[in-house]
Amino acid sequence: MSKEGNKKAQQTLNENGHHERSRLRMKNGGAAKAMMAIQLPSAFQKEVFAQVQDVYPEAKIEYYIHTEADRVKVVDICIPAKKLAIECDGYY
């Protein structure tokens, strides 16, 4: 593809006025990576993770899951061997 074709692809807006390239990047894992840069695990999440890790030492915190649709999701706590994900919403 020519340089001019690349520029046009970069500047293409979809029907909602968003840049298509940015939309695809965010859809395919960019949003999860951006959120990871902003948010650290909360105190509550760390507390739950410590309790889960006592029972399942292989547990992971802030675990990336790649879906069949080539998307990336981030779960707060995951036990991959058990295919178990835990989301922490805070104290109630």
Image (cartoon, helix red, strand yellow):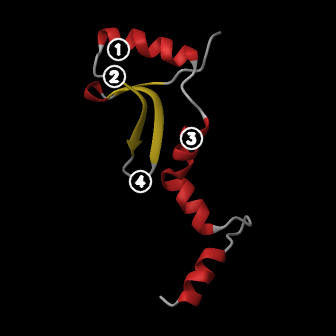
Q: Nearer the viewer, mark 3 or mark 2?
A: 3
Secondary structure category for the residue under label 1 = helix
Residue 62: x %, y % from top left? 45, 31
On residue 53, the disc is 1
Mark 3 or 2 closer to N-term?
3
Q: Say if 59 sits above or below 32 in the image.
A: above
Q: Nearer the viewer, mark 4 or mark 3?
A: 3
Callout 2 amino acid: Ala
Mark 4 or 2 closer to N-term?
2
Callout 4 amino acid: Ala
Secondary structure category for the residue under label 4 = loop
Q: Say if 58 sits above or below 29 in the image.
A: above
Residue at 28% over, 24% down: 82
On residue 43, the disc is none
Q: CA distance from mark 4 to mark 3?
A: 24 Å
Q: CA distance from mark 3 to mark 2?
A: 21 Å
